[in-house]
Image: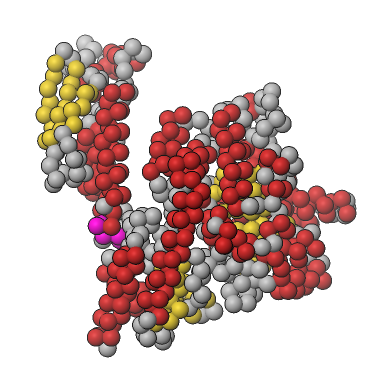
Amino acid sequence: MPTFINNTLNNRTFFHISSNHSSSYHCKKSITLKMSHIPISNSNPPKQTDGNGKANIANILEDKLDPKVSIDMEAPEFKDFAKTMVDFIAEYLENIRERRVLPEVKPGYLKPLIPDTAPEKPEKWQDVMQDIERVIMPGVTHWHSPKFHAYFPTANSYPAIVADMLSGAIACIGFTWIASPACTELEVVMMDWLGKMLELPAEFLACSGGKGGGVIQGTASESTLVALLGAKAKKVKEVKELHPEWDEHTILGKLVGYFSAQAHSSVERAGLLGGVKLRSVQSENHRMRGAALEKAIEQDLAEGLIPFYAVVTLGTTNSCAFDYLDECGPVGNKHNVWVHVDAAYAGSAFICPEYRHLMKGIESADSFNFNPHKWMLVNFDCSAMWLKDPSWVVNAFNVDPLYLKHDMQGSAPDYRHWQIPLGRRFRALKLWFVLRLYGVENLQAHIRRHCNFAKQFGDLCLADSRFELAAEINMGLVCFRLKGSNERNEALLKRINGRGHIHLVPAKIKDVYFLRMAICSRFTQSEDMEYSWKEVSAAADEMEQEQ
């Protein structure tokens, strides 16, 4: 543990931290920190009382209300705190594979470790640093460990972390252009950069001079809902023009949308939030085909319903399967149905030319979304969404009080109209830093490495006659299982996660239960694939020995 030596000189306080390798946060060197003297934190004046011996609150607070007296952390102290935190972050990430990937705590573990109430007096930042290991780390699942293979990756990189620091310092709420012009304008340009990297059709890009453009949402779930609400507004307007005698309630009761049987659960949830019916379309080999979508649309038309929205998934959560966009898109266009493409995970791979065939038919889409915060080294949250005609979303969300109006309206996007919340962070900084400091070539290399690691794990799986693949290996995901019953595979997963050395989650398609192994960490090496496979194999060995 670090030793803190307090020296006071001329009303300035200095702390000297001497550390060794047993320190909870492993400082590599001795750091001398200059602490600003803050009266409310470093002094304990006697209580002032009235004639009856009761504390006089006004007198006690008088010095704290004096604007000349600092109640904030001062810049020199902030610099020392931030430098120590940067050291901690680098140490944590560079050695993350040495930590147990899954915590061993039980629900409620944290409450006894901290006080029941907030401190009345400010504490030292050094004490906060010590509590990171004592309070927080025991309950952290280490998503960026090479041993973490659950869900899909969530991106992380040093440039993105630094960009988040700057975003936090600027701390603007960029709901309109005038609220912070750089926040809006950098986002417009970054979305064009990103769209060009994917070779999206020009109609999606602001630089094309047309209606299209991009926006950074918080998540793909938000993008799906935003697109649904835009499609809903568009269809209601169209139907009202054809049937002016119908009221909006009647129209909404007839609207119906479509999604693949393998689409993410957030699609169904968007229907619930949007107050419309969505129906699942049966897939063929885990993929939605155009003929199946058309059959569903024609059935609903025959029943007097109004098709308005279809979600085509490129890279499903269960198995990273790809719906046939080149078939489904034209069907949607034919029936005047808004086509939204959800490529939350796999979309990052489209920066690599060899994977762009999987987005064939993108020209038929009305909106497209993927998450750079999943696989493109941009920290959460950063979900990229493009719309060919944003006006339907803008008009659906347009509430324009006087206090949000400004003289430049119409000259640049006011992104508050493109999203569900009003406020928004300066998220484009993360894209700008990552794209500049990695470059397209290194981002492509990152994607390709992960795909190769998945193939390596798949080969190890197939070399063991006890196992089989449950789906084709796509991108950085391997779906595999022990040959035999679902119960056998459930027991295997429980044993793997119980050992705590790697972390996997399951999926089920057509009542077949299997394990998902996703490549998630930018620190992953070939040796990590061998380690993870040995963990799977050892768990299977244990099961056999107990039979």
Identify which residue, 11 or 412, lies in the foreground.
412
> As drawn, which residue projects farthest toward the bottom?
547
Q: Residue at x 67, y 44 (%)?
A: 205
Left or right placement of residue 467 versus residue 113 in this view: right
Left or right placement of residue 213 versus residue 149 in this view: right
Q: Quadrant of residue 393?
A: top right
Q: Which quadrant of the figure contains the N terminus? A: top left
Identify which residue, 325 or 504, lies in the foreground.
325
Q: Can residue 544 be seen by looking at this rendering?
A: yes
Q: Quadrant of residue 56?
A: top left
Q: Is residue 334 magenta?
A: no
Identify which residue, 221 or 413, lies in the foreground.
413
Q: Quadrant of residue 452?
A: bottom left
> As drawn, which residue projects farthest toward the front?
441
x%, y% of residue 494?
Answer: 33, 73
Q: Which quadrant of the figure contains the C terminus? A: bottom left
Relative to residue 44, is residue 502 depicted above or below? below
x%, y% of residue 253?
Answer: 74, 60
Relative to residue 95, is residue 545 depicted above or below? below
Q: Residue at x 17, y 37 (%)?
A: 29
x%, y% of residue 503?
Answer: 34, 65
Q: What's the magenta region?
A: 98-103
